[in-house]
Image (tube, grey):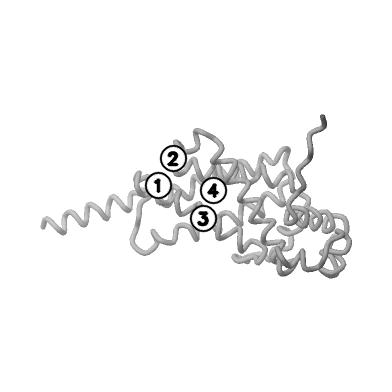
Amino acid sequence: MAKKQTAKPIDSKIKEAYIDFVLEHGKEPASIYKFAKDLKMKEVDFYNHFNSFKALQKHIWADFLKETINNLHAEETFVEYSSREKLLALYFTLIEVLKTNRSYAMMDLQKMRKGDLKPAFLDAFKKQFYKFVDEILLQGKETEEIVDRPVIGDRYSEGLWIQTLFILQFWANDDSKDFEKTDAAIEKAVNVAYDLMGKSPLDSMFDFAKFIFQNR
């Protein structure tokens, strides 16, 4: 007896159709009405899930990161990773997810203005990123892999967001075999970030000066 196939949720059907349209035509559909009609659904069915194409675009990118995080949590050993290892795993896994959607991802990433730290299509992606990274940073501070410095200690996630934008744009322009240069860029970027967030000679000097002052 043939196994009955489960129908795709409407939101997934809409996302897939939107990506296909953009890839085939190089632009978004002319109207939600026409787009819904071509999908043989009512316009209201679209609005029940997304209020615009821009909102749909944000959901698509949020899904990329959601899939990435789900893949990480599916790994039994992930919970044992250090803070640095978890960030490396996040970037490497994200790139693997994006590889399967590269043609679409490239269209959005290549439209990003240089220096734009708040691309609209990454709004929902960014919120998920901050939530995930805040947990990684907290772990790093608890294990002293990261120094919780006054003022800037609460802004480490902002620096990692800028790093993420760099990695995404680097990957979008990477023409190396199997994106080997992107892998190298990720390792170097994460190592520099953790070297900066970790204990440095300046921290040791500050601690020593503080000790001398308190025991003068």
Mark 2 packing: few (<14 Cα in 10 Å), some, or many (20+)?
some
Question: Which residue sits at x=35%, y=44%?
Answer: 143
Q: Which residue is mark 3?
A: 160
Mark 1 packing: few (<14 Cα in 10 Å), some, or many (20+)?
some
Q: CA distance from mark 1 to mark 4?
A: 19 Å
Q: Which residue is mark 2?
A: 82
Question: Which residue sits at x=27%, y=55%?
Answer: 206
Q: Earlier in the sequence, mark 2 or mark 1?
A: 2
Q: CA distance from mark 2 to mark 1?
A: 8 Å
133, 58: nearer the viewer: 58
Q: Earlier in the sequence, mark 3 or mark 1?
A: 1
Q: Kindly state the secondary structure of the residue where label 4 is placed.
A: helix
Which marked residue is nearer to the observer: mark 1 or mark 4?
A: 1
Q: Could you tell me if the residues under marks 3 and 2 are in contact, i.e. CB atoms within 8 Å?
A: no
Amino acid of disc 1? Gln
Q: Kindly state the secondary structure of the residue where label 3 is placed.
A: helix
Q: Which residue is mark 1?
A: 139
Mark 4 packing: few (<14 Cα in 10 Å), some, or many (20+)?
some
Q: Is residue 91 left or right of residue 195?
A: right
Question: Percent position (x, y) of residue 184?
Answer: 60, 41
Which marked residue is nearer to the observer: mark 3 or mark 2?
A: 2
Quarter where residue 215 is shown: bottom left
Amino acid of disc 3? Leu
Q: CA distance from mark 3 to mark 1?
A: 15 Å
Amino acid of disc 2? Ser
Q: Could you tell me if the residues under marks 2 and 4 are in contact, i.e. CB atoms within 8 Å?
A: no
Q: CA distance from mark 2 to mark 4?
A: 16 Å
Amino acid of disc 4? Ala
Q: Earlier in the sequence, mark 1 or mark 4?
A: 1
Q: Which residue is mark 4?
A: 189
Which marked residue is nearer to the observer: mark 3 or mark 1?
A: 1
Which marked residue is nearer to the observer: mark 2 or mark 4?
A: 2
